[in-house]
């Protein structure tokens, strides 16, 4: 199993450009998550999808949209990138155990917006 | 604001010593989890403690949970250089299908 994969690994955008970050998991997990990590801020939840066909806002959803394409894939879209969105983005997934919700993380996408 | 706060923000110790990190949270939880992040990598799940548990062990890791104080601690015994990483606590709030992460403790093990 590859686990959780993310593409691209690095990206540089100009202000106003758009892009989609891709995430896929091959562990048959139900729930998937997008976080951003900034220095000294820990991880902040952007959006999550508890199951295929559902998405919910997290702590910092403004400026982002998501699509749960199928059970395996959960993409994050920046429609008009801003310098404040410079960050490292992590995707994670959770197996279908009702009480635990331990998360499996991808390697991250380092995004710079100039 | 963040559900979890960690203390200290940074910790530097000698190889072989024990390292203790603390985490506080604000609301009732189902469980509390600890993760490790090596530089430039994703987070890796270490250990989970449920709200009805007080202590849990896994290898050189010992986690405690005090729900009356809304706090947890992670103890790494006999530290090794490979333990150098950032450590994050994450709480699963009751009824929520997500975790809330603390800001992390950066641990450095000096040879």
Image (spheres, rainbow, N blue to C red):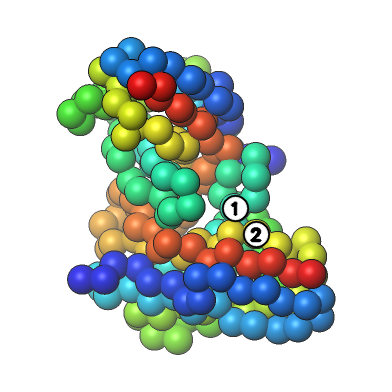
The residue at which mark 1 appears reads as: A37
Q: Which chain is disc 1 placed on?
A: A
Q: Are marks 2 and 1 on the same chain?
A: yes
> Residue placed farthest to the front in the image?
B111
> Residue placed farthest to the bottom in the image?
A69
Position of the C terminus of chain B, as image quadrant, is top left
Q: Is residue A112 visible?
A: yes
- Viewer-proximal residue among B53 and A19: A19
Side (left or right) of A89 relative to B45: right
Q: Residue at x 18, y 29 (%)?
A: B59
Q: Is residue A90 above or below residue B108?
A: below
Numbered tag placed on residue A87 in the rendering = 2
- Per the image, label 2 sits on a secondary structure element best described as strand
In the rendered image, residue B12, in percent from the top left (x then y), is placed at 48, 20
- Viewer-proximal residue among A59 and A109: A109
Classed neighbour count for the residue bearing mark 2: other residues with Cα under 10 Å, few (<14), some (14–19), many (≥20): some
In the rendered image, residue A26, in percent from the top left (x then y), is placed at 27, 75
Q: Residue at x 26, y 71 (%)?
A: A2
Q: Quadrant of residue A15?
A: bottom right
- Viewer-proximal residue among A112 and B46: A112
Classed neighbour count for the residue bearing mark 1: other residues with Cα under 10 Å, few (<14), some (14–19), many (≥20): some
Q: Residue at x 65, y 40 (%)?
A: A40
Q: Is residue B44 above or below residue A106?
A: above
Q: CA distance from mark 2 to mark 1?
A: 6 Å
Q: Residue at x 55, y 25 (%)?
A: B10
- Per the image, label 1 sits on a secondary structure element best described as strand
In the rendered image, residue B101, in percent from the top left (x then y), is placed at 52, 43
CB contact under 8 Å: marks 2 and 1: yes
Q: Is residue B64 visible?
A: no
């Amino acid at each position: 199993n590859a686990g959780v994969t993310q593409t691209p690994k690095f990206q540089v955008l100009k202000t106003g450009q758009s892009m989609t970050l891709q995430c896929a998991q091959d562990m048959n997990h139900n729930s998937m998550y997008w976080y951003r990590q900034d220095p000294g801020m820990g991880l902040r939840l952007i959006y999550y999808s508890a199951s295929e066909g559902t998405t919910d806002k997290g702590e910092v959803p403004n400026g982002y949209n998501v699509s749960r394409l199928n059970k395996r894939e959960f993409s994050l879209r920046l429609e008009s990138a801003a310098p404040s969105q410079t960050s490292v983005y992590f995707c994670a997934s959770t197996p279908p155990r009702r009480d635990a919700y331990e998360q499996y993380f991808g390697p991250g996408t380092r995004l710079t917006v100039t | 604001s963040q559900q979890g706060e960690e203390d200290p923000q940074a910790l530097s110790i000698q190889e072989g010593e024990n390292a203790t990190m603390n985490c506080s949270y604000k609301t009732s939880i189902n469980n509390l989890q600890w993760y490790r992040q090596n530089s430039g990598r994703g987070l890796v799940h270490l250990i989970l403690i449920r709200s009805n548990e007080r202590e849990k062990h896994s290898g050189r890791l010992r986690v405690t949970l005090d729900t009356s104080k809304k706090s947890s601690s992670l103890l790494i015994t006999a530290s090794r250089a490979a333990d150098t990483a950032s450590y994050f606590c994450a709480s699963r709030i009751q009824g929520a299908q997500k975790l809330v992460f603390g800001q992390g403790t950066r641990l450095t093990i000096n040879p």
